[in-house]
């Protein structure tokens, strides 16, 4: 036990019969390792900062004063035209609905794919145990590729519009939710599955009747949380021509001065929508998981 904790090196060993001495020795080692990790982190941060500064077109500290220049210009113009903002908010509601529809459809498609892939990638439940690493790596690949990269590739194939955005978000959602769903399924009680198997149930029946009823509350909770994330992703994809409120925001910002009241109205509408979605999904997540 001593060698497992303190290594095989020779020298004085702490007296493990003395609980206080052993505890202090473990604390010292943890602090030492923590200090080394902190030094590595600081070195990486310093190296990254120097690299970014050397490749930047201008100096960071020289330009930091301009950080608030553009926002102040936007809000100054919006304040002058504040009477028009309520009408502009109403005008962009259809684009917001399109954004929410993109997120909803992508979440449903991605969650459906995640359910299947997670069960096929869960040890002890998989239909083909030898293929578990294959499905896990597939989900890793789906999570690793950002939605905007997938969307940009699909634009060349399908053209602009909401369809590439739906596919891009659904692919990333399948990878992210698949990982979470698999972790929840690994903690499921296997006794119902074994009971169903003993009476001749096939794999699909065992999953549907023995596993899914156990994991459904947590799966639904994760699905709602992912829907919140996908609303934001859908708005961001609008900047690459995928439709929705993000596209309206891009057009308004490209027009520049004279349309900043439109920019503020879109930001305000998007902020209010995200707050409402967050609060609503949070309420339902608590009810699903805690039952009240």
Image (cartoon, rainbow, N blue to C red):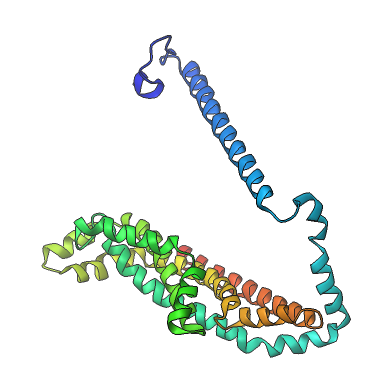
x and y percentages locating residue 218 in the rendered image: 42, 63
Residue closer to the observer: 121 or 57: 57
Q: Quarter holding the N terminus? A: top left
Most extreme residue toward the top, as rendered?
Answer: 12
Residue closer to the observer: 290 or 256: 256
Q: Residue 94: which quarter of the image?
A: bottom right
Residue closer to the observer: 267 or 59: 59
- Does 1 sit left or right of 48 as displayed? left
Residue ID at (50%, 72%): 227
x and y percentages locating residue 75 in the rendered image: 82, 73
Q: Residue 140: which quarter of the image?
A: bottom left
x and y percentages locating residue 149 in the rendered image: 49, 68
- Does 240 sit left or right of 219 as displayed? right
- Does 246 sit left or right of 101 as displayed? right
x and y percentages locating residue 49 in the rendered image: 65, 45
Residue closer to the observer: 245 or 86: 245
**Could you tell me how many numbered marks the image carries?**
0
- Is residue 185 visible to the viewer in this orientation of the structure? no
Residue ID at (31%, 55%): 186
Note whether 28 is above or below 62 in the view shown.
Answer: above
- Is residue 72 visible to the viewer in this orientation of the structure? yes
Note whether 277 is above or below 184 in the view shown.
Answer: below
Residue ID at (12%, 62%): 198
Most extreme residue toward the right, as rendered?
Answer: 80
Note whether 136 is above or below 236 in the view shown.
Answer: above
Residue ID at (86%, 74%): 76
Q: Residue 99: which quarter of the image?
A: bottom right
């Amino acid at each position: 036990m001593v060698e497992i904790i303190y290594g095989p090196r020779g020298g004085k060993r702490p007296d493990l019969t003395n609980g206080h001495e052993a505890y202090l020795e473990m604390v010292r080692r943890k602090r030492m390792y923590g200090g080394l990790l902190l030094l590595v982190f600081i070195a990486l941060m310093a190296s990254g900062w120097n690299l970014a500064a050397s490749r930047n077109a201008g100096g960071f500290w020289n330009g930091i004063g301009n950080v608030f220049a553009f926002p102040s210009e936007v809000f100054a113009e919006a304040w002058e035209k504040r009477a028009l903002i309520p009408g502009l908010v109403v005008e962009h509601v259809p684009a917001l609905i399109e954004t929410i529809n993109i997120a909803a459809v992508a979440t449903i498609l991605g969650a459906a794919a995640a359910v299947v892939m997670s069960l096929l990638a869960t040890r002890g439940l998989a239909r083909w145990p030898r293929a578990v690493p294959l499905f896990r790596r597939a989900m890793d690949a789906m999570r690793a590729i950002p939605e905007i990269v997938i969307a940009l590739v699909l634009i060349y194939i399908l053209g602009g519009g909401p369809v590439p955005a739906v596919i891009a978000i659904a692919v990333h959602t399948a990878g992210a939710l698949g990982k979470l769903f698999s972790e929840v399924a690994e903690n499921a009680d296997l006794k119902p599955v074994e009971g169903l198997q003993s009476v001749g149930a096939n794999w699909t029946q065992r999953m549907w009747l023995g596993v899914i009823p156990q994991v459904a509350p947590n799966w639904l909770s994760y699905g709602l949380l992912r829907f919140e994330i996908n609303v934001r992703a859908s708005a961001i994809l609008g900047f690459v021509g995928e439709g929705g409120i993000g596209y309206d925001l891009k057009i308004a910002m490209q027009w520049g001065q004279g349309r900043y009241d439109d920019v503020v109205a879109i930001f305000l509408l998007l902020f209010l929508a995200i707050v409402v979605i967050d609060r609503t999904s949070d309420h339902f997540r608590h009810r699903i998981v805690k039952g009240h």
